[in-house]
Amino acid sequence: MTKSRDYVNEFFDVFRDDVMSDIHGSIRCKIVKVNADKTYDVQPLALFSDGTKRPQLLSLQASFIPIKIKYHDDIGDSHSFTPFYAEMTINYQVGDVVVVVFEDRDTSNAKGDSVYKIDSERMHDANDGVIVGKIDIK
């Protein structure tokens, strides 16, 4: 007697894998270009399962941790000190390995700190990536 196949479970296994492959969470990338508008073009490092490269992600914004450093140079009682303030700037460069996360919804209309209209039903899409940090590969 031949073993019967469970076609329903096989269908849902394939269906689940297909759906999961379309949901983007995060991926490691290498910066390939710094654009004039302070966005970045990146190349995902993970290959597709068939060994081909994934397409570049273009014009990604980068997040950063806003840090303000206060430094006091207090030499002694006879000298007054002047606080020195330094600001951190984004220092992403070509060749850096970064982590890119994908926003929940379409961000094509997002500009600055204004509310924006969602123009499509896309969710967790590769078109909505944001660089969230650099990976130290040393």
Image (cartoon, helix red, strand yellow):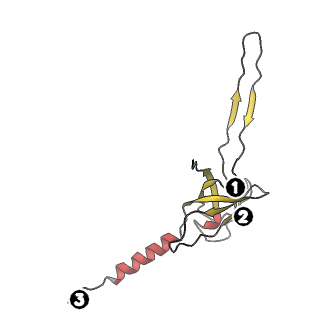
How far from the left and from the top, in percent, is residue 132?
62, 52
The amino acid type found where label 1 is placed reads: Val
In percent of the image, x 78 and y 57: which residue is there?
37
As shown in the figure, which amino acid type bears the numbered disc 2? Asn
Mark 1: secondary structure: loop
For disc 3, the neighbor class at 10 Å (few under 14, some 14 to 19, many from 20) is few
Residue marked by disc 1: 94
Query: Which disc number belongs to residue 2?
Result: 3
Residue 109, numbered circle: 2
Looking at the image, which residue sits at the far left? 1
Q: Residue at x 67, y 63 (%)?
A: 107
**Pointer 2 or 3: first along the chain:** 3
Figure disc tally = 3
Q: Secondary structure at mark 3?
A: loop
Q: Are marks 1 and 2 in contact (CB under 8 Å)?
A: no
**Is 88 left or right of 54, judged from the image as shown?**
right
Q: Position of residue 106 (x, y in %)?
A: 64, 66
The quarter holding residue 24 reads bottom right
**Mark 2 falls on what kind of element?**
loop
Q: Left or right? Give the position of 24 relative to 41.
A: left
Task: Kindly report the distance in space between the C-alpha atoms of the residues bearing marks 2 and 3.
Answer: 57 Å
Q: Kindly report which numbered mark, 2 or 3, lies closer to the viewer in this rendering.
A: 3
Question: How busy is the neighbourhood of tag 2: few (under 14 within 10 Å), some, or many (20 plus)?
Answer: few
Mark 1 or 2, nearer chain start: 1
Against 85, residue 118 (above or below) is below
Q: Amino acid at mark 3?
A: Thr
**Real-space CA distance between mark 1 and mark 2, rounded to the nearest whole angstrom:** 26 Å
Q: Identify which residue is drawn at 65% across, 44% down.
A: 65
Residue 89 vs residue 33, the one in the foreground: 33
Q: Position of residue 89 (x, y in %)?
A: 72, 44
